[in-house]
Each structure stands twice: as structure tokens, then as C-alpha cells.
Image (cartoon, rainbow, N blue to C red):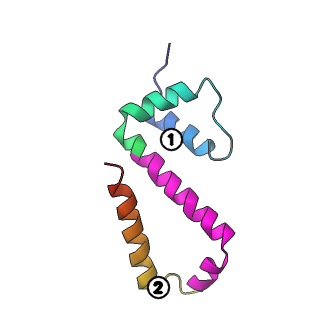
Amino acid sequence: MLGWLSCKKYTESLSRSLDKPLAAHEKPMHWFHWFICFSCRRFRKQLLIIERAVKQCRDEPELLEAAGADGLSEEARSEIRRCLEQELAGEN
């Protein structure tokens, strides 16, 4: 029988799963919680967006260099905002 996984436990183990895969017994509980909890689905989607962005910066260090010491340009900020809004709109 599946046990109930709280949102706190779900998000903690989801964050850990980025470094180490979930154990076989955890996967059904994760799937069930993800299926019924809109907030955790949104959290998972946001976490995956952040993970992709970090990997892209790691794989393409020139992106970080282009930002320079002054941070991101307003154009870059607008593009990031647009991409995030597009990603989040796709979850509905």
C-alpha cells in the first residue's frame, strides 16, 4: 500500500533526486503525489527549468562571461522572463 508523501518530503526528495536517482520504493509515492498535487507539479517544473539553466551555464561558460560584472542586461532579463512564462504556461 502506498503511504502519503507530504509536500515537504516530496520536494526534499525531488531535490535530492537531481544528484541521486530515487529508490524503486519511492517512485510510486512520487508519482502519486505528483499526480494529485498541483503545487508540487509546478515546483518540479520550476526545478527542472533551473537545472537545465545551470547545466547550460556549465556547458557554455561564455554565457556567464557575457553577463559581466554588472549582471544581466535588461534585454537578457526580459528574455529569461519570457522563457519562464512560456514554460509555466505550458504546464496548464
Q: Quadrant of residue 41 in the image?
A: top left
Residue placed farthest to the front in the image?
90
Which mark is on residue 11? Answer: 1
Examine the residues drawn in magenta and state their main secondary structure. helix
Reading the image, the residue beneath label 2 is 73
In this rendering, the label closer to the viewer, 2 or 1: 2
Secondary structure at badge 1 equals helix
Residue 24 at x, y = what percent?
63, 26
Residue 37 at x, y = what percent?
37, 35
The answer to whether 63 is drawn above or below residue 46 in the figure is below
The answer to whether 80 is drawn above or below residue 33 in the figure is below
Task: Write down the region rendered in magenta.
Answer: 42-67
- Amino acid marked by disc 1: Thr
- Amino acid marked by disc 2: Ser
Give the side of residue 89 with respect to residue 30, left or right. Answer: left
Q: Does the segment drawn in magenta span residue 5? A: no
48 and 4: which is toward the camera: 48
Name the residue at 56% across, 60% down. 52
Name the residue at 55% across, 41% down. 14
Name the residue at 48% across, 37% down. 8
Secondary structure at badge 2 equals loop
Label 2 to label 1: alpha-carbon separation: 32 Å
Give the side of residue 46 with respect to residue 26, left or right. Answer: left
Mark 2 or mark 1, earlier in chain? 1
Q: Does the segment drawn in magenta span residue 66? A: yes
Q: Residues within 10 Å of mark 2 (few under 14, many from 20)?
A: few
Would you say the residues marked 2 and 1 are in contact, meaning their CB atoms lie under 8 Å apart?
Answer: no
60 and 73: which is toward the camera: 60
